[in-house]
Amino acid sequence: MATHDYVIANGTGAAVRSDINGALAAIVSQNSNASEPATMYAYQWWADTTTGLLKIRNAANSAWVTIGTLASANLGLLPLAGGTMTGVLAVTAGTAALPGIAVSGDPNTGIYSPGADQIGIATGGTGRVFVSSAGLVGIGTTGPNTTLSVVGGISGGVVTETSAIALPSVATNGYLRLVGAYQQGSGRGGTIQLGGRSFSDSGNVGAFLISANSTGNNNTTDLTISTQTSFNNVISDIVTVTATGRVGIGTTSPSSNLHVSAASGTAIKISETNNGVSGSLQAGSTSVSLGTDTNHSLNFYTNAVERARIDTSGRLLVGTSTAISTINYAGGDRTPRLQVVGDDVSNGSFAIIRTQTSPSLFFGGGTSGTNVASGNAIGSIVFTGYHTDKYYTGASIDVAVDGTPGANDMPGRLVFSTTPDGPGNSPTERMRITNAGIIVAKTNSDDINIGGTLGPCIASTSRCGFAFSTNSLLPTNGAGTLSDNGISLGLGSYRWSVVYAGTGTINTSDANLKQDIDSLSVAELTVATNIKSLIKKFRFKDAVEAKGDDARIHVGVIAQEVAEAFVNAGLDPYCYGLFCEDELEDGSKRLGIRYDELLAFVIASL
């Protein structure tokens, strides 16, 4: 591939020869290159290897003109010996005497254009068929005023054969004939007759008529398709097209654009004989039916694309032509009656909207004569995901009867389930709402109940909980019953970081609840006096690790030093409530101090 500016620059002999060789290479390759030459000339050739086209520069040197296709024989152009045209063939308009496209050896027979946007066909130098700029076709006339105008002669007031469209049959002498003078009954005018003999033949039988009928003094005309078994028989109208464009089949007075009427049975039937498919539309005494009569689906299309179908099993499928039968739920594969399939939120969803108030979606269990009982399922919403070979359930919302139902009485519960990770797992109940409004959250080891006999409360079945009272948060046992002085807040291994309160805690100090009341002993007062000197300032290690130098300084005692003070006085620190030792989950122990009792203990020594 090469291009050249076709200007041979001055230089040494070798340089000039190289430049000339470059120009010759561009010439012999028709300037073949993926992009146009940098320097272009009028009538310059270019083999465009990007598009695969051979092009030539126009006379003004302003644009490229495509000549043909590089990879095609004869550059893809029509050879003189004949071929297939893929572009426009322009010829002279010609005349009827000398058509622009004529038959070889017969120059006055062919196709010509009698005027702008018009086509004519001539034979023997005379125009025979004409198509106007409006698409109207004339046979025997150059000025058609209808879609098809046929002009012939009239002899003695009788329409002649040359003014009719005739399809003669040698065996029966039958005609397809348009006769404006024919009358059959009051108001029946121009008629097309199929079958039988001529209109004047009294032996005419088996005629099929298409007639224009006058329907009143206003001269409005209906088109009627009729049958007649003999010339003198009353004509039976089959199809009527009114002057307003309404079509009636089985009725002469259609009340809509298409009106099909039948005394009984199928009104409209369609069929495809190769595969034996058929369907029908009919009106019964109390209903209208639409469907297939054979074992085939009923499909619904918009914009030439199938949108929904009812398959042979009665399933309504939207967005798919094949029912999904691999939805695994409750131990087996299911094939739902309604399936909506799509590749995004809009196509794979459906909406229920009520413009005035909230919409409704109803589920029902049981039917007339079959009552539901406690524990019966009455509705489910199942969430699935496809993997490998089928849709597996990931979660579900189920509704069941929750108690004994009766007339105007249907207690129910909601059950929420999710499927745990791991092959072969099924949905496991995680939460339920009972008919009493109690919310039961399922965990791996226990249930958490929200609500109960106390009203609003949260309780773990085998552990504890709390209830909501007026301006109070109260402790409960696992059954949701109020518990007094039996529930702790936090554990040794799991402490609350900070408690924010408007006032301090209130500790029980009622004499009616105490025994062994006595003054501190000398040894105890000694310990209390010594503890005063043990008060120190410090910073917590975890605070320093998290905040660095910004960790704040605290004031207090060291539990180990307090224990040592008791031991030095011959006392056991574990006998006193101000000293605490908690065993942690890892088996280690952590010491603590009840500062309210420690302060009371120290104050006694003052």
Image (cartoon, rainbow, N blue to C red):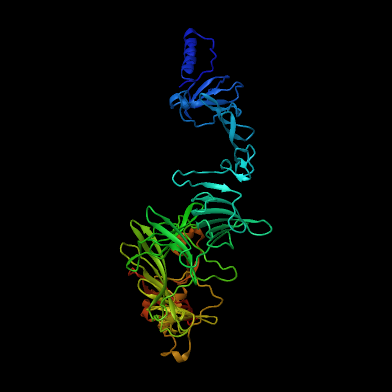
> Seen in the image, is 42 located left or right of residue 463?
right
Foreground of the two, 409 or 301: 301
Instruction: Report the residue at 53% width, 53% height from top.
Output: 209
Whole-percent x and y of residue 582? 37, 74
* Up-down relation of residue 141 to residue 262 (above or below): above
Whole-percent x and y of residue 299? 45, 58
Whole-percent x and y of residue 392? 36, 62
Foreground of the two, 361 or 221: 221
> How many marks are shown on the rendered structure?
0
> Seen in the image, is 423 located left or right of residue 191?
left
Instruction: Report the residue at 45% width, 66% height from top.
Output: 265
Whole-percent x and y of residue 147? 60, 44
* Up-down relation of residue 217 to residue 113 (above or below): below
Foreground of the two, 376 or 287: 287
Does residue 135 appear anywhere in the picture?
no
* Outermost residue toward the top in this view: 13
* Outermost residue toward the bottom in this view: 512
Does residue 192 appear anywhere in the picture?
yes
Foreground of the two, 484 or 431: 431
* Outermost residue toward the left in this view: 424
* The N terminus, quarter of image: top left
* Up-down relation of residue 163 to residue 266 (above or below): above
Query: Quarter-wise, where is residue 563 in the image?
Result: bottom left
